[in-house]
Image (tube, grey):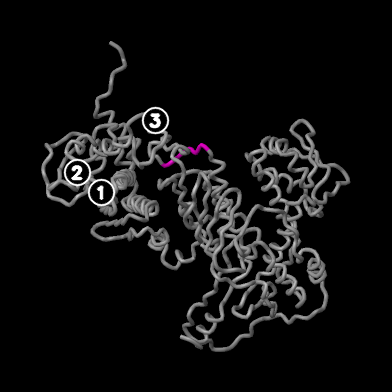
Amino acid sequence: MGQIQVMSEMLANQIAAGEVVERPASCVKELLENSMDAGAREIRVSLGEGGISFIRVQDNGAGMVEEDALLAFARHATSKLKSPRDLLRINSLGFRGEALASIAAVAKVLLQTRVPHSSQGIQVELQGGQLMTQPQPVGMPPGTVLEVHQLFFNTPARLKYLRSVQTEQSRCVAVVQTAALSRPDIRFTLEIEDRIVFQSFGRGSLREVLAGLYGAGEAAQLLSVTAHSPDYQVSGFIARPTQARASRNHLQIFINRRPVRNLALYQAVEAGYRGRLMVNRHPICALHLMMDPGLVDVNIHPHKAEVRLSEERDVAEVVQQSVTHALEIAFLVPDVRAPKAQSLPTQQTRLPLTSVDNRGSRSYQMLVREKETVLQPTQSSTTGISVDKQESNKTCGGSANYKENGLDHDLNLQDTPNLANLRPIAQALGMYIVADDGDALYIIDQHAAHERVLFERFSERLQVQQVQSMSLLAPMTLHPEPILYEAALQHLQALTELGLAVEDFGSQSLLIREVPAIWEGLDASVLTEDLLQAVVGTDRTIGASDVLRERVALQACKSAVKANHSLSQIEMEALCEALAKAKDPFHCPHGRPVLIRLTNRELEKEFRRIV
């Protein structure tokens, strides 16, 4: 007798359930998708023991007739697909017809459903995938209620590998919150042990949902992102750099209202923040991308979260541009709100302000010299951006519309202070410049500010290829690891354009004859390896030049004025003037804040001049 045999239907269903229903959160996700596909406007989720013992999802969607209520639990039964061609243009969240069959195979399920035109609903009860009783009539409002009891009751091995109740509960909460972000037009309620822990209003406001997740104060600071092209539409919100988090868990991307995981899009969002985020910090983000369903394949993973984009590079570019421009037109100076004083100090202490004069110093000579070069407006190359009526920079208010690379961007600009009005008053603690603009007080990190000025100076020179190279007295030989060696050979032309003359010396070796002049006095071998590491895995033509330019310019920051370096009044004025003209005066090239702001109104409140 042969060894191969057909599995029983029960065994096949349990194995299939392992791909779809890994834990309670997977079950909640599948049921929510069914409710959203059914056109529900209100969805209520209830959990017991983190969803392990009890899950209940109730909606006011289309409901099902008796025939469909029974057929819904059959494997691969779906109302979403009629022919293989439909797989190429999937508009629904669910489509495989595996969810209910998989859930019913490993749990005890009670389904109640009613279509709007019927006077009563239908109740169906299953256990381990088997129908327990014939369908029974039940009184209920239109919609569907599906209860899942004792998940994995018949597969104890799977039950054993679940995490704690608190962990499983947290994952279920995250699923409901993600669903609310994907559909702000639906009212979601999450109830745990008879206590409401999350609720959205279903008024179509994404910011309102974000306020429910992060608080009204955080949500109010989020920046709106809106862009259009013939093939893609982008909308949503991104956080200011000061709101960044330690993980990517707060980075949410939706394609055609489906939450997706896509590394290229995650990287595109973070690339839009380039130079504004500190190391190991990640943005809060909720971005919706709408596109032709034919351009995205959602049928590559059982959970339908990972997707394949036919034009991934184009989509990533649209996302990156949208994020970058939302940040560029925002005024990103953090406001300082001093805590309420608990008691008055017993003695007064002097604010250690450094007295300033116009005597020269090394820093003075440097900044005055830069005032004739760096601080003058530089001639910029054409970018293809057109702005209605006024230039959309950091000092203007109102609204603007511009078009870049085929994208139409709608911007809502708030009235913002003008950094050109900054007047330095004094230097404090040897490292900060105190300035005002007539409406607010500013504290400027002199090192971070000068880093930003120098970074943009060298970046502009690199952009227009006005880079001076410096010949080494003796060529330097490098023996990089194989992956860096291959990166150098792949990007030889880009390195040469940046003033770094690199040759293949054979035997996995490189010969360096020239380096950028701005590297004078620095370890060229270390910097070269750093450059090559930055472009490992980068496409030969797309992105490599930008990465290399940024890394070369970052080395200019080493010559910025340091802490405890006394600045004269004219030096501070020169630095403030240069900073006001910077493209991004709010962050140093490493993502740290350059200045903070305390408004006149906030000062008056702290001194009790107003209440």
What's the magenta region? Answer: 305-310
Residue at 46% across, 66% down: 220
Per the model, the C-alpha gap separating discs 2 and 3 is 31 Å
Mark number displayed over residue 61: 1
In terms of secondary structure, where does tag 2 sit? Answer: strand
Q: Position of residue 307 (x, y in %)?
A: 45, 39
Nearest to viewer (mark 3 / mark 1): 3
Q: Amino acid at mark 1?
A: Gly
Residue in the foreground of this view, choosing between 608 and 254: 254
User: Residue 85, labelled with which disc?
Assistant: 3
Is the C-beta separation of discs 2 and 3 under 8 Å?
Answer: no
Tell me, yes or no, whether the highlighted magenta stretch contains residue 261. Answer: no
The residue to which callout 2 is attached is 111
Residue extending farthest to the top is 1
**Residue at the (53%, 60%) spot, across then down:** 411
Nearer the observer: mark 2 or 1; the answer is: 1
Return the residue found at the far right: 473
Q: Is residue 454 left or right of residue 163?
A: right
- Res 245 seen here: no
In-front residue for pair 112/311: 311
Residue drawn at (58%, 62%) of the image: 329
Q: Position of residue 485 (x, y in %)?
A: 71, 36
Q: Amino acid at mark 3?
A: Arg
